[in-house]
Amino acid sequence: MLGASVRADVRVDWRAAVSLVGSVVKYLSVAMLAPMLVALYYGEDVGVFGVSIVLTVFFGIALERLDDDPDLGAREAFLMVSLTWLVVAVVGAVPYVLAGIGTASTLADPVNALFESMSGFTTTGATVMGQIGFERHSHALLLWRQLTQWLGGMGIVVLAVAILPELSVGGAQLMDAEAPGPGIEKLTPRIAETARILWQAYLGLTVLQFLLLYGLHLAGFAPNMGLYNAVAHPLTTMPTGGFSPAARSIEAFSAAVQWVIIPFMVVAGTNFALVWKATQGRPRVFAEDGEFRFYAGVMGVLTAVVAGLLFAGLGPGLSAIPTEVRPIPGSTERAIRHAAFQVTSIVTTTGYASMDFNTWSEPAKYLLLFGMFVGGSAGSTGGAIKVVRWLVVLKSLKRELFTTIHPEAVSPVRLGGRPVDERAIRGIYAFTLLYLVIFFVSVAVVFVDAVRIDYQLSVLEVMSAVAATLGNVGPGFGAVGPMNGYTDFAWTSKVYMVLLMWAGRLEILPVFVLLTRSYWQS
C-alpha cells in the first residue's frame, strides 16, 4: 500500500518524456549519414558509422515505444529536455569508442568518449583527444565531432520542434526549457515556425561563412583552408563551439581566415531574433537594443586593453607566431588581431585559439578569465551567465543606489524601454548566485580530486577548467590551455565536468529542478 501511495503522488509522466527522447535519438541517426558519406569517400571508419547508425535507430525506437501517445506537460518538458541532452551525448559517444578500439587513441576509453561527445553537443569545445589524436582519427570521425557542435548550437530540441509534428504542441514549453538564455523571443504566432526561422538564420550564416572561407582558399589567401576545412569550421563557429580538425585550432590558418571568423563569432553570440529582424529590413535593431550595445561595448573594451598589453610586450608569445600564419607584417596588426580574436572567442564562449594564449602575461590571462563569465546574448548560441543577466544586475544595483537616496521614488528596471518584471529580476539574481556557488564548489571538488591522484595544477588552471566547462567555453590556462586538453584529469573529474557541461548548457535550473522532491510529487 505504501508503494502504491508513493506512485500515486508522482506527478510526472516519465514514460511520455522518455518516449519523446527516443524520437529525437532515432532521428539523430540521420545526422550520422553525413560522416558516413565522408567515410565512404575516404575509405575510413565506414564500419564505425554503419554500426553507430544501426545502434542509434534501434535504441531510439526502443525508447519511443514506451508510450504510444505521449502527452507533454510543463514537468514532462523539463524532464524530456534534460534527458535528451544527456542521452544524445551518450549515443554520440558510440562512434568515438568504436573508432578508438584497437588504436592508442584516448577515445577508446568510454569516459573520454563521453567527455568529448558532451563537449561537442553542449558546444563546450574542451577536448581529451590530445595533439596526436587529430592525426590518428579519420576525416569522418573529425567531421562527426564538428557536426555534434552544429546540432547542439541552436538546440537539438529546438530543431526537433521545428521538424517533428509530435513536438509542436508542447514546443513553447520545450524551447523555454532549452532556451540559451532567459528565453527565446516568439517571432511568429506558431512556435514551430519560430523554431524554423531560428534554424534557417543559423543555416544561412553557416553557409555564408563556408563561402567566404572557401573563397579565401580559392583566391590564395588561405592555402590550407581546403574544402574539408571550409566545411568543418562554420559547423563550430556558428554554434560557438570551437572544435577544429586542426590540432592547433585557428592558429594553423592565415591571418585572413582569422579576420573572417571574428565577425561570425560576434554574430553567433548575438540574439538570433535581432539577426532575423535585421534581415526583414530593420537593420537599426542592433543600435536600438540595449543588450547588444552592452555586449559590443564589453568586447570592445576588453579587446582594447588586451591589445594594449600585447603591443606593450606583455604577451611574449606574440613574437613566436610562425611566419606563414602572419602574412601581414607589423606587431600592431598582430596585437589587434589576436586580442580581438581571443576576446571574441572567449566572451562568446566559442573557444577557438588564434595562438597559444598561455604565453600571454598574467593580466591578459585574467582578463580572459573574466570574459569566461560574461557570455553571449540571450537567444544566441553562447554560454556562460549571459550579457542580459549582467545588464539587469547592473541596472538593478543602480536602482538600489538611487532608491537609497530617494526611498519614495518608484524606479523600475528597464530593458529596451520596457520595465522588467520584479520576479524576473529575482530569478536573474538567483541564477547568477547559483552559477557562482556551483563554480566555487566545483573548483574545490576538481582541485581536491587532482591532489588525490597527484596531478599538479595551479588554482588558476583549476578555476579556468571549471569556468570553461560550466560556461561551455572549452579551453582554459596551463594544462587545459588551447593547445593542450583535459586528458590527464582523473576519470572522476571528467565525469564531474561532463555534468557541469550538461548543466551549463541547460542553464542549470532545468537540471536542478529534477533534483527537487516537489517536482516529482504533488
Image (spheres, rainbow, N blue to C red):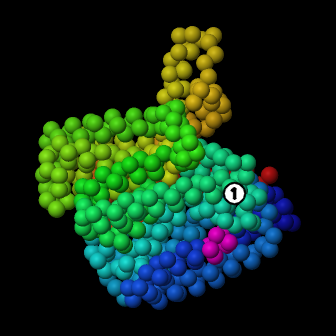
Q: Which quadrant would residue 44 be assigned to in this image?
A: bottom left
The amino acid type found where label 1 is placed reads Ala
Asked if residue 23 is positioned above or below residue 154 in the image, the reply reads: below
Residue stretch in magenta? 21-27
Q: Can the viewer see residue 230 in this picture?
A: yes
Disc 1 crowd rating (10 Å Cα; few below 14, some 14-19, many 20+) is many
Q: List x then y, in percent, for residue 8.
A: 84, 61
Report the residue marked by disc 1: 192
Q: Which element is circle 1 on?
A: helix
Number of marks present in the image shown? 1
Q: Quadrant of the N terminus?
A: bottom right
Q: Nearer the viewer, residue 64 or 145?
A: 145
At 51% across and 35% down in the image, what residue appears? 284
Q: Is residue 178 highlighted in magenta?
A: no
At 51% across and 39% down in the image, what residue appears? 283
Q: Is residue 24 highlighted in magenta?
A: yes
Q: Nearer the viewer, residue 487 or 459?
A: 487
Q: List x then y, in percent, for residue 112.
A: 41, 72
